[in-house]
Image (cartoon, rainbow, N blue to C red):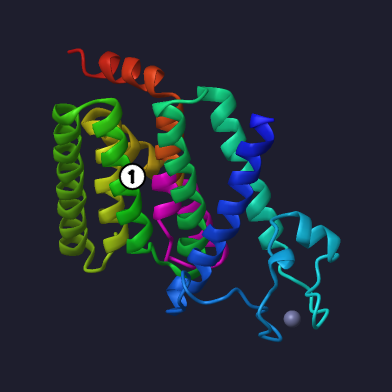
Amino acid sequence: MIYVLVFMMGCILGSFYLVIATRLPKGEDVLFSRSHCDNCHKDLKWYNLIPVFSYIIQGGKCSFCQQKIDPLHLIVELITGTMFLASYLYFGFGYNFLINLIIVSLTIIIYISDFKYMIILDSPLIVSSVFIINLKLIYLGLKPTLYSILCGICLFVIMLLVQQLGKFMFKRDALGGGDIKLSFVIGLLLDFRLGLIVLILSTFLALPYSVASLYLIKNNEVPYGPFLVGAMLIVFMLAPKFELLFDFLFRF
Ligand SMILES: [Zn+2]
């Protein structure tokens, strides 16, 4: 029963994340406007909005104008639901599970908005930070929380320096402001050592993609955010292993 509940919660939030990631960059309101069909603009009824089920029952079409609904809706809902369920199976209920839900949520939103619009929205970063700080206060106490905030600021400054250095050396922006703000969240969430590993790992993840997109489609505008959150997810789930790796590398 709890598995179904966690999965459904993921599907519902996934459908909300898709709305955030595709409407906010266009300046559309997401909290107070009714959901509507992108083709006929009719307001959707509650039974059109049940994640996964509505899509399947309506055969992937709008029930008013029969226009095909982007299958991205179904895909994002299923992926988010599956990742929520996987987090529960991996961690069980508790601090790590809740934190992992925040990382999964950020991953979904940033993948969509950064690949589609080359933008990392501020509001998901702000909301995540507030959640993370509260969870740390509840589970870890005041001192570790303040330390984590300090770590976030450190990573933010490091990325800011990298950006300024890149600007100075290559005369163009290699890092967006969103990537730098995201680094604060990474430091806040993982503290300094693991945060640093995320920054390093993300460049390794981004490298094959950048090279491929440069040579195959002659595009040198590569979003970096998806690789940062991807690395954050990997490092958080395998945190003890990366702690050992860090100890091993920096022992001398
Ligand atoms: Zn329609």
Q: Main secondary structure of the magenta part?
A: helix
- Return the x and y of residue 240 as percentages of the image width and height: 38, 18
Give the residue number, with chain letter if any, for mark 1: 131
Which residue does the image show at 44% across and 24% down from the upper left?
238
Coordinates of residue 111 in the picture (x, y in percent): 50, 55
Specify whether 69 is left or right of 207: right
Q: Answer yes or no: is residue 80 visible.
A: no
User: Tag 1, which secondary structure?
Assistant: helix
Seen from this angle, which residue lies furthest bottom?
40
Q: Quadrant where the N terminus lies? A: top right
Rendered position, 125 above or below 233? below
Q: Is residue 176 above or below residue 153?
A: below
Q: Please name the residue shown 28% across and 31% down the image.
A: 138
Query: In the rendered view, does 159 fall on the left or right side of 121?
Result: left
Q: Quadrant of ligand 1?
A: bottom right
Cβ of mark 1 under 8 A from ligand 1: no
Q: Amino acid at mark 1?
A: Phe
Q: Residues within 10 Å of mark 1 (few under 14, many from 20)?
A: some
The one nearer the camera, 188 or 98, is 98
Q: Position of residue 10 (x, y in %)?
A: 59, 45
Viewer-closest of 109 and 162: 109
| Residue depicted at 15% across the width and 42% down the height | 154
Instruction: Residue 52: say if magenta.
Output: no
The residue stretch that appears in magenta: 207-229
Q: Would you identify the image quadrant in which residue 16 lies?
A: bottom right
Which of the pair 118/169 is nearer the observer?
118
Residue 221 falls within the magenta-colored stretch: yes
- Confirm whether residue 123 shows in the render: yes
Residue at figure coordinates x 60%, y 58% from the top left: 15
Vertical side of 18 occupied by 199: above or below: above
